[in-house]
Amino acid sequence: MTVSINNFDASTVSASAHVDIGDAVRRSRQAIGYSVDELALTCGLTDAEITKIELGADADPGKLRRIAAALQLPVTAFLLS
């Protein structure tokens, strides 16, 4: 099942469509070749903030926008993985 901003209807999304934003951030960071330290420096967050996001403990939209900009990705890349 693919969920996009254009066809998103929360009432029809099943539990199996769960998106792991933290995992998507980690995979995107690794695909670019950044360490946590490098990403933190590039987007202006701390190592601890990046780690919390990748572990799924924080999904602050502002922080996700900063990470996406640093990785030159749209924020939706973290939602559609």
Image (cartoon, helix red, strand yellow):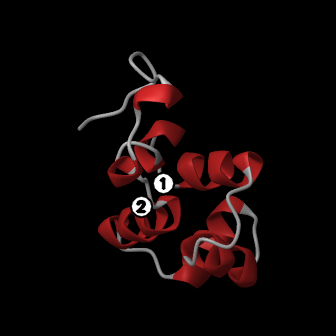
Estimate the x, y position of residue 14 in percent, counting from the top left.
38, 43
At 64% across and 52% down in the image, what residue appears?
64
Q: Is residue 37 above or below residue 43?
A: below
**Which residue is at the front of the view, 17 or 68?**
17
User: Nearer the N terminus, badge 2 or badge 1?
Assistant: 2
Tags 2 and 1 touching, CB below 8 Å: no
Check disc 2: other Cα within 10 Å, few if <14, some if 14-19, many if 20+.
some
Q: Secondary structure at mark 2?
A: helix
Q: Amino acid at mark 1?
A: Leu
Q: Amino acid at mark 2?
A: Ala
Q: Horizontal placement of 15 versus 49: left or right?
A: left
At 48% across and 63% down in the image, what residue appears?
25
Extreme-left residue of the structure: 1
The residue pinned by badge 2 equals 24
The residue pinned by badge 1 equals 71
At 73% across and 83% down in the image, what residue appears?
48
Q: Secondary structure at mark 1?
A: loop
Check disc 1: other Cα within 10 Å, few if <14, some if 14-19, many if 20+.
many
Q: Is residue 69 above or below residue 23?
A: above
